[in-house]
Image: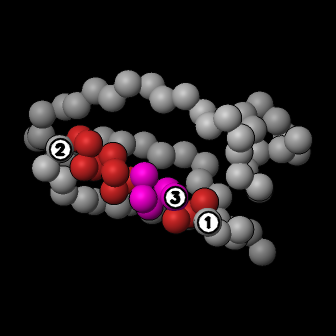
Amino acid sequence: MKIEATVVLKLQASSLSEAGAVLDDLLGRTRERDDVDVAQVTVTTPPGATPVSLPAVSAPREYPPGVPRPGSIDGA
């Protein structure tokens, strides 16, 4: 059985670097699992906070098993 779930995480960090490290740790833990695929990550600032612009990131060279490459249907 497959399901899709939207998960909202709220975290506080003293810097963008610290926030990035926390997100990297969380995403790293999901990559260790065979039964969880991360399809999208959206980072926003809370309402009323000073907006922060983040640079675009490149896709990893190799995708973990079960994660389809962008533009592919079967993940091949």
In this picture, residue 47 sits left or right of residue 24: left
Q: Disc 2 residue type? A: Ser
In this picture, residue 21 sits left or right of residue 35: left
Indicate which disc, 2 or 3, sits on the residue closer to the N terminus. Answer: 2
Q: Quadrant of the C terminus?
A: top right
Q: CA separation, marks 3 and 1?
A: 7 Å
For the stretch drawn in magenta, the main secondary structure is helix
Q: Which residue is mark 2?
A: 15
Q: Residue at position x 11%, y 41% from top?
A: 48
Indicate which disc, 2 or 1, sits on the residue closer to the N terminus. Answer: 2
Instruction: Tell me: residue 21, above or below residue 72.
Output: below
Q: Which residue is mark 3?
A: 28
Q: Which residue is mark 1?
A: 32
Asked which quadrant contains residue 58, the reply is top right
In this picture, residue 57 sits left or right of residue 60: left
Q: Disc 3 residue type? A: Gly
Q: Disc 1 residue type? A: Glu
62, 51: nearer the viewer: 62
In terms of secondary structure, where does tag 1 sit?
A: loop
Q: CA separation, marks 2 and 1?
A: 26 Å
Is 33 colored magenta in this rendering?
no
> Residue 12: percent from the left, percent from the top?
18, 57
- Total numbered labels: 3
In terms of secondary structure, where does tag 2 sit?
A: loop
- State yes or no: discs 3 and 1 in contact (Cβ < 8 Å): yes
- Magenta residues span 24-28
